[in-house]
Image (cartoon, rainbow, N blue to C red):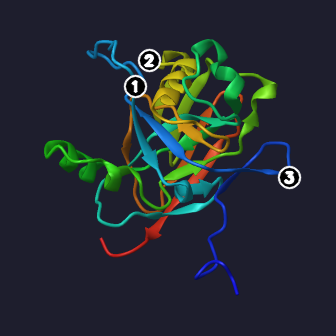
Amino acid sequence: MSEFVFAPPAIPSVAVAGSSQRFPVHCIYCVSHNYATPGREISSEPPVFFMKPADAIVANGAAVPYPSRTTNCQHEIELVVALGRKGRDISERQALEHVFGYAVGIDLTRRDLQRSAKQWGQPWDAAKAFEGSAPVAAIRPAALGHVSQGRIWLTVNGELRQESDVKHMLWDVRHIIAELSTLYEVRPGDLVFCGTPAGVGAVRRGDRLEGGVEGLEVLRITIGSARGPD
């Protein structure tokens, strides 16, 4: 007799560049508002984090169903940091020792639900943490070099929508890991989406999205038909 009442789901995972092994995903943490924008003062406040479920992961090249209960699903291209060591209260000096590698991700967002939640002071969970909301390309191991600068970009149907440089993040990877580890014990398998530059916008069924960070595998997805009734 099985110890489970039904078969447990497969472990969400991400491809590793140059390897047949895969990176098992534990938690997905995301950083909000991490790029400077015109007219916005740089804040001395710590970064704000939110989470997505591990099974929000979508593989590179997949078709992502258009999410339900929204008419304004938007793209956000991001540098993703994959963690390979456990730690709490990690110093910035030691933060990069916990990095397994880097990848490109897209944080899909039901923007209309997010705006409504902000208006009423409610959590963002329904806007951010839904099925298929975290496409991720293959992870490049940190042994090949850490990412502190480089072009970050996204196109929709060949049209450039977002473009910046990772060096313009308000909080760099060291700072993000150090701060996150004061709130949670980070673990091997954690992914950290590091925030998106300006230019986010709506996607529609049939759209082809391509996005990248210099030196990492390019992420390509298409937006498919709706998962359920709008």
Toward the viewer: 204 or 92? 92
Nearer the camera: disc 3 or disc 1: 1
Mark 1 closeness class: few <14, some 14–19, many ≥20 residues within 10 Å: some
Mark 2 vs mark 1: in front? 1
For badge 2, the amino acid type reads: Leu
The amino acid type found where label 3 is placed reads: Ser
Of 220 and 139, which appears nearest the observer? 139
Q: Give the SS element for disc 2.
A: loop
Give the residue pinned by disc 2: 170
Query: Dot 1 corresponds to which residue?
Result: 47
Q: x, y (%) of residue 196?
A: 45, 32
Q: Splitting the image into 4 quarters, where does residue 214 fall?
A: top right
> Do the residues under discs 2 and 1 have CB atoms within 8 angstroms?
yes
Residue 124 position, x and y percent, is: 30, 48
Residue 73: tell me if it is visible.
Answer: no
Query: As displayed, is residue 38 above or below residue 128?
Result: above
Mark 3 vs 1, N-terminal side: 3
Horizontal placement of 161 versus 18: left or right?
left
Give the SS element for disc 3.
loop
- Residue assigned mark 3: 20
Q: Earlier in the sequence, mark 2 or mark 1?
A: 1
Q: Is residue 69 left or right of residue 95?
A: left
Above-or-below relation of 115 to 133: above
Q: Amino acid at mark 1?
A: Pro
Q: Where's residue 181, x and y in %?
A: 52, 29
Tag 1's secondary structure?
loop
- Asked if the residues shown at circle 3 and circle 1 are in contact, with their CB atoms under 8 angstroms apart, the answer is no
Question: Which quadrant, please, contains the N terminus?
Answer: bottom right
Q: Residue at x 17, y 43 (%)?
A: 121
